[in-house]
Amino acid sequence: MSDEKLPILLVPDARLRLKARAVEAGDDDSVRDLSARMLATMYAAPGIGLAAPQVGSGLRLIVLDVGPKDAPEPMVLVNPEILAASREMAIREEGCLSLPGQYADVERPERVKVRWRGLDGMRHETEAEGLLGVCLQHEIDHLNGVLFVDHLSPLKRNMMLRKLAKELKARTFDE
Ligand code: NI
């Protein structure tokens, strides 16, 4: 199993806008390797969640770790889906490794019920709220080509995308 890091795609890379396809039985080996590399990439960034489309893969696969820094709790979710969402909403600040340096308050359902398969093929289901709930929704969005800025008003989104473009351009000149 390789833990070699992968390059993270940045907005406006068109691959971030594609809908990912379900992982099938034949994908097992590549998913094992890909998820290990995604975790290494996420921890190095550092980040708490990463979806396969962010590293150029079209598979429905996400990794995350919302555990304390001194006690890592890596999670690998294959074909995760949101089964139900609470009517109550909650607001939390979000960022994304594909939009470095950009943060905004995003409103989402407070609780979600999520189902997925583990690397071992075992089926899992959980109800999540707080940081885990937000992280799951944010990463599953990525599998559908949706970014956290899509939840903002058009005005706020465009402001943020323009700011990101400017910062990335400045970064290129620095190098
Ligand atoms: Ni993200």
Image: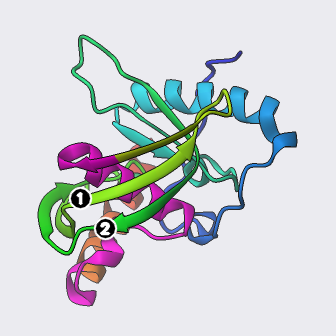
Residue type (three-letter) at the residue carrying disc 1: Arg
The residue where tag 1 is placed is: 111
Task: Specify whether tag 1 is near ligand 1 (CB below 8 Å).
Answer: no
Specify the farthest residue to the top.
Answer: 70
Using a 10 Å C-alpha cutoff, classify the residue at mark 2 as few (fewer than 14 neighbours), some (14 to 19) or many (20 or more).
some
Identity of the residue drawn at 55% across and 68% down: 144
Vertical side of 139 occupied by 163: above or below: below
Quarter of the displayed picture in which ligand 1 can be seen: bottom left
Vertical side of 136 occupied by 77: above or below: above
Specify the label residue 89 is tagged with.
none
Q: Which residues are magenta?
A: 127-156
x then y, percent, for residue 73? 36, 22
Residue type (three-letter) at the residue carrying disc 2: Ala
Q: Is residue 150 magenta?
A: yes
Identity of the residue drawn at 79% across and 34% down: 28
User: Circle 1 sits in a helix, a strand or a loop, which is it?
Assistant: strand
Marks 2 and 1, the one that precedes in the sequence: 2
Location of the N terminus (image quadrant): top right
Q: Is residue 79 magenta?
A: no
How far separated are the C-alphas under marks 2 and 1? 6 Å
The residue where tag 2 is placed is: 85
x then y, percent, for residue 78? 61, 43
Tell me whether the residue at label 2 lies in contact with that at label 1, contact meaning CB atoms closer than 8 angstroms: yes
Q: Quadrant of residue 4?
A: top right
Q: Is residue 73 left or right of residue 67?
A: right
x then y, percent, for residue 146? 46, 70
Work out whether residue 45 or residue 32 is closer to the camera in this orientation and state it.
32
